[in-house]
Image (tube, helix red, strand yellow):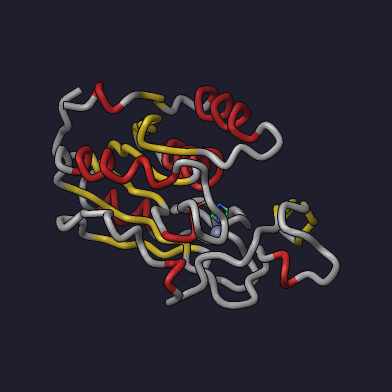
Amino acid sequence: MPISSRTALLVIDVQNDFIPGGQLPVPEGDQIVPLINRIAGHFKQVLIAQDWHPKGHVSFASSHPGRQPFDVIQLPYGAQTLWPDHCVQATPGAQFHPELDLPHAQLIIRKGCNPDIDSYSAFLEADRRTTTGLAGYLKERGMDTVYMVGLALDFCVMFSALDARAAGFNTFVVLDACRAIDLDGSLAAAMDRMQGAGVGLIQSTEIS
Ligand code: VGL
Ligand code: ZN
């Protein structure tokens, strides 16, 4: 598929804490970096999402006495998986992988900044009401199609893809340029949900 001028690439959460050795490592998370750099060369419009939590964020197990990482609790907006502290604003773990090389990226969108609301999606926070403004940005710039790569396939990539679809964008996830956490079957569930929503699940070899 050749890339039209109305198509953007969204590179999701390729940050040190999601790389092996980080606080919330995604297995093989580092292996997609060279591929993402290569894919990005096909796109004029490149955007980057960055998980960017304040200290003491509601998604951290350490904010809930007696809870452990990967427990699920109920918050006012619904179920919330608890995570190790990760991607704390301005810490080394929140920085992009040092080999991520996207000099022509025009926008970095930071998410999860609200202390009381998580945001896996780069479009809509977990309360499903608070928007990040990303859909408006893309629409004002004439984009109708979004390709996604990054981490983690079964959390931030999936929710961003579902929300991009819901916002009316043609949406493709480049599977070999993603890696998953795969917690309790979350990867299989994510694939089903994306397929059901009409998200295109493709390989990087389909991009030219
Ligand atoms: C993510 C869990 C918590 C992700 C972010 O980038 O997929 N997962 N915060
Ligand atoms: Zn997070």
Instruction: Give whichever of 104, 33 is nearer the camera.
Output: 33
- Residue plotted at (41% across, 38% down): 178
Q: Is residue 13 left or right of residue 84?
A: left
Up-down relation of residue 28 to residue 23 (above or below): above
Looking at the picture, tell me which residue is in the foreground, 67 or 164.
Answer: 67
Residue 132 position in % (x across, y down): 44, 61
Give the image location of residue 111, x and y in percent. 47, 63
178 and 168: which one is in front?
Answer: 178
Q: Quadrant of residue 64?
A: bottom right
Going 56% across and 61% down the picture, which residue do you hit? 23
Q: Assign ligand 2 to one image quadrant.
A: bottom right
Residue 61 found in image quarter: bottom right
Quadrant occupied by the C terminus = top left
Measured from the top left, where is residue 3 in percent x and y?
17, 32
- Seen in the image, is 6 located left or right of residue 135? left
Q: Position of residue 39 (x, y in %)?
A: 22, 38
Q: Is residue 75 left or right of residue 198?
A: right
- What count of labels does the image hold? 0
Residue found at the far front of this picture: 21
**11 up-or-down from 6: above or below:** below
